[in-house]
Amino acid sequence: MARACDLARRCPPSETAFSVGAVIVAHGEVVGEGWSRAEGPHDHAEEVALRQAGAAARGAVAYSSMEPCARRASRPRPCARLLSEAGVARVAYALREPANFVDAPGGDAYLRETGVLVTEMPEFAAAAEAPNAHLL
């Protein structure tokens, strides 16, 4: 989770989107990592990490500095759905998604409903909030 929070600091700042970092680990090895806006203005961290991980995401653990989104304006499939469809077995996140941009429940509930194990790690919340201080 510390790595995911560190990656969030690489995000180009935005007044209209959070800065998030994500890491996907399979069998003890990092198979994907990403951060918001890493490859394009609408990229989410989990989306970038899943692209890197490819098929290795199946059965893996995803660490995200913020709760994966359950709805998004920029693309049709939110991160919670992408993680579930990729077959990620467990998702851990540091900070619940604030309702700044989307008035909808976060991805925690969606992930649980689709059988993904979910763990909130509030001990990393301050590290996840830091790159988003201008929005919170």
Image (tube, helix red, strand yellow):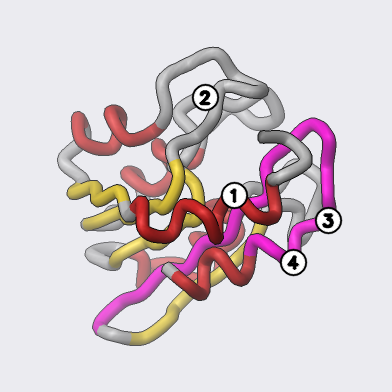
Mark sitting earlier along the chain (1/2): 2
Q: CA distance from mark 1 to mark 4?
A: 14 Å
The magenta stretch is 8-27
Label annotation for residue 129: 1
Label annotation for residue 12: 3
Does the magenta segment cover residue 133? no
Q: Are marks 1 and 4 in contact (CB under 8 Å)?
A: no
Closer to the observer: label 1 or label 4? Answer: 1
Residue bearing the label numbered 2: 71
Disc 2 marks a residue whose amino acid type is: Arg
Disc 4 marks a residue whose amino acid type is: Arg
Mark sitting earlier along the chain (4/2): 4
Image location of residue 52, percent across then percent down: 55, 70
Quadrant of the drawing holding the N terminus: bottom left
Image location of residue 135, percent across then percent down: 73, 35
Q: CA distance from mark 2 to mark 3?
A: 21 Å
Residue bearing the label numbered 4: 10
